[in-house]
Image (tube, helix red, strand yellow):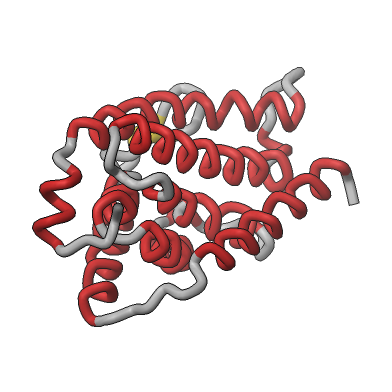
Amino acid sequence: MTPSTMITAVFTVAYLAVTAWLCRGLRLNTRSVCYGGLTCAATLVLGSFLLYLPTGAAISPGSWIPLMLLALTYDWRLACVTGWVTGILAIFLIPAWAPVHWAQIFVEHLVAFSALGYAGIFGNGKKWKVLCGVLLAILLRFIGQMLSGVVFFSQNAWDGWGAWGYSITYHLSCKIPEGTATTLIMLALPLKTIQNAIGGKQS
């Protein structure tokens, strides 16, 4: 096992274990399932429209927003679980997310979408809490996809860049613009008003 593979394996196992532990006690009712289903559908639809950048990476028209909104206005644990479901469905419904190896599903698919649920881990009572949660979610998504690039797509590295340099640059090129736009939108939304309207549980 190479050092890159070992780092990726440790991160993936730790992330999935910690997230599963934090989501313990989540109880699903009819409302939660409906909100989760609508969020999953919205994420998959928005994720199907991609704008490709010169680096080869792509950004979507707000596909991160539904899961973050669910996390910040209803229950961030539900958003994480919904993210897992969305990651699995993306394999079949979004061509760009077709895995090249079965292990990629754990490294990237189950991390990239569920990580967006961490946007609500600090609550929505203060703008700085929203900002910290959104930045944490973006960071976790970046790490998962970056490690996936190192392990599963190193053959695509540009000449002289190496797997790490290529994957980091590739994913920063799309995460910075999409992450910036998403952060500004989440900070601008009336989260408390939305929360009260849908009967959210966020504090």
Establish if 198 lies above or below 117.
Answer: below
In the shown orientation, is residue 148 left or right of residue 113?
right
Q: Is residue 185 left or right of residue 145?
A: left
Residue at 27% from the left image edge and 73% from the top image edge: 32
- Residue 104 place in picture, x, y as percent: 64, 57
The one of 184 and 93 positioned closer to us in this rendering: 184
Q: How many numbered badges does the structure rendering display?
A: 0
The image position of residue 168, as x and y in percent, is: 62, 28
- Viewer can see residue 38: yes
**x 38%, y 57%: residue:** 76
Residue 48 appears in the figure: no
Residue 147 located left or right of residue 4? left
Provide residue 190's location: percent of width, then percent of height.
Answer: 14, 40
- Can you tell which quarter of the image residue 59 is in? top left
Q: Nearer the viewer, residue 47 or 132?
A: 132
Q: Position of residue 109 (x, y in %)?
A: 53, 57
Residue toward you, 166 or 42: 42
Left or right, residue 79 beside residue 126: right
Q: Is residue 102 above or below residue 5?
A: below
Q: Is residue 201 above or below residue 139?
A: below
Please tell me which residue is depicted at 44% across the width and 25% down the height of the picture. Answer: 176
**Residue at figure coordinates x 69%, y 30% from the top left:** 157
Residue furthest to the top in view is 160
